[in-house]
Amino acid sequence: MPKPSPFRYFKTSPEIIRLAVMLYIRFPLSLRNVEDLLHERGIEISHETVRFWWNRFGPMFAAEIRRRRVERMRSSQHWRWHLDEMFVKINGELHYLWRAVDHEGEVLESFVTKRRD
């Protein structure tokens, strides 16, 4: 059974939603700047719509970009990662923060523990 599209209840096409969200994420633009850029291309939406789309689809697009980057790096022979250990204070108590970081500095996974084991 095919996975249902996350865009199925939206009247706007997925390409326009992706364009608006990626413009906001990729470039240092405000929501109103994205609204103006899309208006220049003949797409009439409000900045609140861009904010809603960003909240709804931003994490999905970011996970997709990360997944593609990891797949591309795994196919490369130069893909490396290492484990970072840091101390963080949470509610006044010291905890260990463990992070798996790739060679580009992207955090792959993180985990917080009270003890070092």
Image: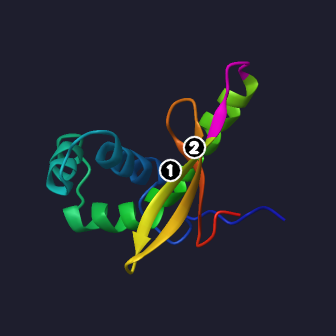
- Quarter of the image that includes the C terminus: bottom right
- In-image side of 102 versus 4 (left or right): left
Which residue is disc 2 drawn over?
A: 66
Kindly indicate whether the residue at mark 1 contacts the one at mark 2 (C-beta within 8 angstroms). Answer: yes
Q: Nearer the viewer, residue 9 or 34?
A: 34
Q: From the viewer's perspective, is residue 64 above or below residue 111? A: above
Residue occupying the point 57% across, 43% down: 66
Q: Amino acid at mark 1?
A: Ala
Residue 66, above or below 97: above
For the residue labelled by badge 1, is the local secondary structure a helix, a strand or a loop? helix
- Which quadrant of the rendered structure holds the N terminus? bottom right
| Helix, strand or loop under label 2 | helix
Q: What amino acid is at disc 2?
A: Arg
The tag on residue 62 is: 1
Q: Position of residue 68 (x, y in %)?
A: 63, 38
The image quadrant that residue 6 belongs to is: bottom right
Render colour scheme: rainbow
Does residue 45 appear anywhere in the picture?
A: yes
